Amino acid sequence: MSAATETRRSTGEWVQLGVAAVVVAIMFYPTIWMVLSAFKSNREIFKQPFALPSTWRWENLVEAWVTGGMGGLYLNSIFVTVIGVTLCVGTATAAAFAFTRLEFPFRRLCYRLMLIGLLLPPPTVAIPLFTQLRDMGILNTPWALILPGAAWSLSLTVFLMRSYFNGVRPDMEEAARIDGANTWQIFWRISVPMVWPAMLTMIVINTINIWNELLFALLFIVDEDKRTLPVGLVRFYGYHSTDYALVFAALAITTVPILVLYFILQKHVIAGLSATAMD
């Protein structure tokens, strides 16, 4: 009886594994198809869209890099993403610490007002944000993307970081306060190391969001030398015709580094999200 139960259980696990593999393959195949199309000619993309390239055209990647000026676009995207993610995660971690560990007037009200940011889609604030950035004198500068990108990701980051703080026992923080540590020392030396897994999770998530941001980059940046990668991809689409081989090559150059980053850190991302979900 026990052996039969074990056999049925093993068979069920194999079925679950098979179904999961099929779902993952279906979801991930568009990315594989994009990468394979980057090495084909335009004729081959339309004639044999699902086949492997008959000849691997590595020159497509070189031509896309040179034609699209992707070196400068990469530097701009890296600068905007690194500064934006640093501002967002650093500010959100401090805010989450304040909402969970400190007592101050209107704490719950401030937290709920911040969560309103989760409900607003970017197009609803595009025009007033454009006017505000213009009045601040930072329109058509990298800060026109850094500040809105960091602010737009702040609500979700604070929400998840607060959930993680709620799951961490404050015993060590209370002991440090008894020993004479001030609030800043407790936050920097004790709380930040304890919530580092959640911070790493939010770093990855916000990197993907800010790296792929398109609407604000189209509206707030005019000079070509200040544009980021998502906007630079528009260069590959012609009014009357489009070189799809170069389009897929540029998409592969833009997408693959972020995918590699996610796969390297996926265990930390899953662990961090699981911990925040337990609150």
Image: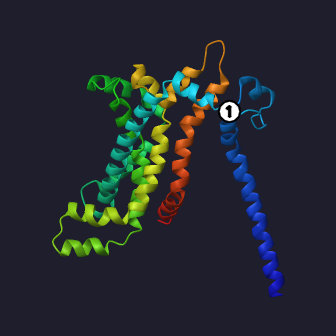
- The kind of secondary structure element at disc 1 is loop
Q: What residue did someone put label 1 on? A: 39
Position in image of residue 267 (x %, y %): 53, 60
- Answer above or below: position of 164 versus 125: below
- The residue drawn where x is 49% and y is 43% is 208
- Asked whether, in this view, residue 106 is left or right of residue 164, the answer is left
Position in image of residue 30 (x %, y %): 69, 40
Name the residue nearer the viewer: 223 or 274.
223
Q: Is residue 240 visible?
A: yes
Position in image of residue 262 (x %, y %): 53, 50
- Answer above or below: position of 221 versus 162: above
Quadrant of res 180: bottom left
- The residue drawn where x is 77% and y is 75% is 9
Name the residue nearer the viewer: 220 or 86.
86
Quadrant of res 53: top right
Name the residue nearer the viewer: 33 or 273.
33
Position in image of residue 248 (x %, y %): 63, 30
Q: Residues within 10 Å of mark 1 (few under 14, many from 20)?
A: many
- The residue drawn where x is 34% and y is 64% is 193
- The residue drawn where x is 48% and y is 24% is 69
